[in-house]
Amino acid sequence: MTTMRYDNPFPGMNPYLEQPRFWPGLHNDLIAQMRTNLGPQLPPQYRMEINERFELDVVWPADDADTRDILPDLSVTTERAGSAGVAVADAAGGVLVATPAPVRVTYLEVRRAPDDQVVTVVEILSPSNKLPGSGRADYIRKREDILGSPVNLVEIDLLRAGEPMPLTTPVPHCHYRILVSREQWRPSARLFPFMVWDAIPKFRLPLLEGDEPIEADIGPLLAAMHHTARYNMAVNYEVPPPGPALEPECQRWVQKQLSAFQGAK
């Protein structure tokens, strides 16, 4: 009998968890874990609050397995005249239509007592933020509002698909990135780019000027989530990660990593 391993097979982000089947739960769980982990480390005048908003996202079938038993919502039809001169629709083929739907997105706010001032916003980017559409446009407007205010911004991008958030400085190729924009530094900011084979970088969570930032390390939180959510029981590691396709060198590394993980007892 093979014993299931619940560990994260990768040193940092698991690219298989980027697929729509897992991403919403991972996103919201990681936000909750960050509050649980970082909240107690804050100076006594600060607290962390989870907030939420709804973004309009286009919902696509998650993968082939999810669409096997789905009946098409729409049939492409051709019209011909019936015997009574009435147009009759002939089904030419079934298709699935991507439909806009509201998606719940959670994020963190660091607030200072007693006035409950918002000091720092922590965002984990969603697919709707990186793909063309109203979700991206709405988020970029919110992002610009934060960057034009006294509020610090931490932006965590654990998705390879879509267009990264705009920066004025060219960034070398990377799969993932963490941006730390402290109000006192602007227009400068710290960017932590990393690849699928890297550990998730630690970063310092900014607070108000004069207050010491705290260190945030989300890699162990993601590793612990592999145990609590038991992702490996549901992930199909026999196929490549969801798109976009990894570079050949990265794909070879992924296969080697998975072979070692699955072969370890």
Image (cartoon, helix red, strand yellow):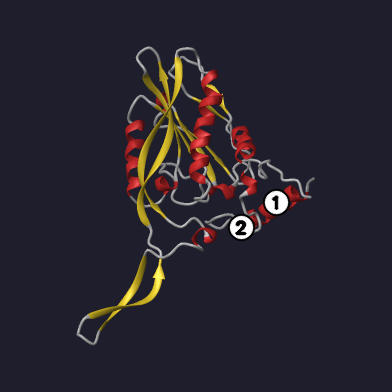
Asked whether the viewer can see residue 173, the reply is no
Q: In this figure, which residue is indicated by the disc labeled 1?
A: 258
* Residue at the (55%, 55%) spot, across then down: 242
Task: Give the amino acid type for the residue marked by disc 2 in the picture.
Answer: Pro
Left or right, 1 with respect to 63, comes to: right
Asked whether the viewer can see residue 113, the reply is yes
Whether residue 189 is situated above or below residue 48 in the rendered picture:
below
* Residue at the (42%, 43%) spot, across then down: 165
Q: Is there a contact, CB below 8 Å, between mark 2 and mark 1? A: no
In the picture, the disc for residue 61 is none
Q: In this figure, which residue is indicated by the disc labeled 2?
A: 240
Q: Earlier in the sequence, mark 2 or mark 1?
A: 2
Whether residue 207 is situated above or below residue 258 in the rendered picture:
above
In percent of width and height, residue 106 lies at: 43, 35
* Element carrying mark 2: loop
Q: Residues within 10 Å of mark 1 (few under 14, many from 20)?
A: some
The quadrant of the image that shows the C terminus is: top right
* Element carrying mark 1: helix
Name the outermost residue toward the bottom.
83
Task: Give the amino acid type for the residue marked by disc 1 in the picture.
Answer: Leu
